[in-house]
Amino acid sequence: MTNDQAVRRKRGFWERNKLSGGYLLRKKIYDVSFKIARAFLLFGMCFLILQPILMKISVSFMEERDLYNPMVISIPEHFTTANYQLTAQFMTYGRSLINTLIVSLTVALVQIAVCTLVGYGFARFEFPFKKLWFACVILVIVIPPQTISSSLHLHFRYFDVFGIAKALTGHTINLRGSVLPYYLMSAGCMGLKCGLYIYMIRQFFRNIPKELEEAAYVDGCGTFKTFVRIMLPDAKPILTSCFLFAFVWQWTDNFYSKMFLGNISLLAKELAVVADRMDAWVVNTLKIPGGASVGYTNCIVSTGTLMVIIPLLILYLFAQKGFVESISSSGIKM
Amino acid sequence: MKKRKKYAGLQKRKAISGYLFISPFIIGFLAFMVVPLFQSLYMSFCSVQLSPEGISNTYTGLENYRQAFLVDTEFNRLLVEEISRMGINSVAIMVFSFFVALILNQKFKGRALVRAIFFLPVILSSGVILGVETDNALLASVESMVEETTNVTSISDTIQTILITSGVGARAFSAVFDIVDGIYDVAIASGIQIIIFLSGLQTISDSMYEAASIEGCTAWESFWKITLPMISPMILVNWVYTVVDFCMRSDNELIEKISEQMIAYINYGFASAMSWVYFVVILAIIGITSLIISKGVYYYD
């Protein structure tokens, strides 16, 4: 037996190929060419995704004349960091960054805390009309927030709880431009993509074995204590990834920010207007009546985009596992 | 008798605590979804006037809808354009993300890095960045300048000219080439979908493929007979997610028009009417398509 194996191992590739009637060679060629084709394809697609970022990085270090120089494609001839200083000035970067950080963190925390409660409730309890309420969650995912935005706008413009404020002061409270409405909405699971978080968290809690919960009940744990002590520690990965998503999407969100967080300077909002600021600055400060050139404006916008996403990229570098792995392990199904 | 009553009590207690857990959602849903939804539906039939005291709605019937469909020059065009763009792109996104998920599910060197790059769009294609990206004329202007100075056209352009001048199915080719040229948009919009498909692929056990190959199944057959049915629940999820995600993108022109009407012109009635038309159309599309897809969905357990 061992002798036989030793003989077989000594045989070279061609001999084995001959024994198999050419099958081995064909299979080898097939495998290698498949690998090469796949490598090409993957490289191409990765490049496709990365190219705009790389392009933005190279453009953000160029002077204006480099943009119009056909010889300069990706490596700037006149290296400068002036673009960053200008953009930071247009976006009031320091203040916006801190504001965005605070708002995104707190909103994401509120959203995930509430969504965890709701997701747990849907996953582990039986109660009347459960199907109906869950259909409402699906509805929340499906309804575009734009549909209700007009009336929400007015809702908070003339905000009142059962007419109390009107009775006391004679007029309703204007909550537009204050941060409160958005936090209220987040606490009511109606913030940015909250339905999706409920869905994912519920999916996770459904997969936890029932015995674990029953054991806790038998040992005298109450409902809430079971949730905090037994279930929450298990749910850490999915909660982290939901939190990261909430944080990132809130960071770049323009729709809700524009509508509810009117008075605070946030990065996403500043980025949307950076081109206009640039134009105004060129006209008013540099006294060039035509305004900024298209190329240079886009250079500034690219720099601005880069400055908005750099914190997120750093976060992604360190927390990449948290973003991806837990979602793919939770098994989202319908 | 006593025992049964106690069980009913436990069940009742669990039902109450269940409702306690989901109460934030119920309150939020009623206050910030149902009320505004009906309010905006009502407003779409009204002419809305704002004053410091409050809102005054005067009922005008279908006037706003008439204005949207018959008077406004842009609305019909934008609606049709956005819906058809959504249809084409959603299909392209589904095919692309499924394909990428199939590749990323294989084992090869540097898989972690490639995965990290493919999920990068989850961050980069959200919110305001997408809107800034689409009207980035710099790349276009640089490209056109390079083309002018060097007299070189892109590969896809050349192939397109060759194929179209050969005269076979020119219109079909141009639709395909639109997608190929827009592959960046597709790639950048399919981060989450890839994750969902991957999670589905990972739940298929290897023993199934082994059994199939022992029975003489080729890789091609086992793809159609095993992979596709097992992944079909994810296809439904992904389809709904893709369509919804596409409707809420910030580079959607119809949405821009609606919020412009609302914020700049303070024309709430008209804006509500337009957004309701949009919402109903989307809901109908999602409902019909997911009904069709769910006929083909196969649940393993």
Image (spheres, coloured by chain):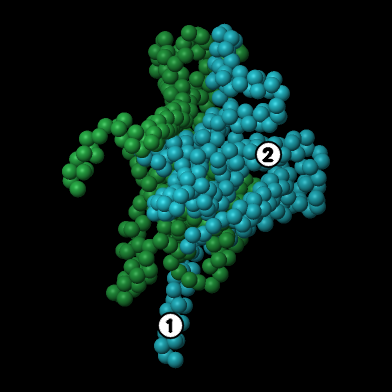
Chain colours: A green, B cyan
Who is closer to the viewer here, A273 or A55?
Answer: A55
Q: Tell me, yes or no, if residue B108 can be seen here.
A: no
Q: Does A165 sit left or right of B215 as displayed?
A: right
Provide the secondary structure element on which disc 1 rests: helix
Q: Earlier in the sequence, mark 1 or mark 2?
A: 1
SS under mark 2: helix
Residue to which mark 2 is pinned: B84
Residue under circle 1? B7
* Label disc, if present, on residue A236 of the rendered structure: none
Q: In front: mark 1 or mark 2?
A: 2
Whether residue B81 sits left or right of residue B62 in the image: it is left
The chain carrying label 2 is B
The kind of residue tagged 2 is: Ser
Which residue is at the front of the view, B203 or B122?
Answer: B203
Quarter of the view holding residue A40: top left
Label 1 – label 2 distance at C-alpha? 55 Å
Query: Which residue lies at the image location 37% right of the left edge and 32% below the top edge?
Result: A25
Where in the figure is residue A278, as x and y percent of width and height?
Answer: 53, 21
Asked if labels 1 and 2 share a chain, the reply is yes
Q: Quadrant of residue A309?
A: top left
Classify 10 Å Cα crowding around label 2: few (below 14), some (14-19), many (20 and above).
Answer: few
Q: Position of residue B113 (x, y in %)?
A: 36, 35
Q: Position of residue A253 (x, y in %)?
A: 51, 40
Q: How many marks?
A: 2
Q: Is residue B182 visible?
A: yes
- Residue at the image position 78 percent from the left and 46 percent from the top: B65
Residue A252 lies, in percent from the top left, at 48, 38
Relative to B129, residue B27 above or below: below
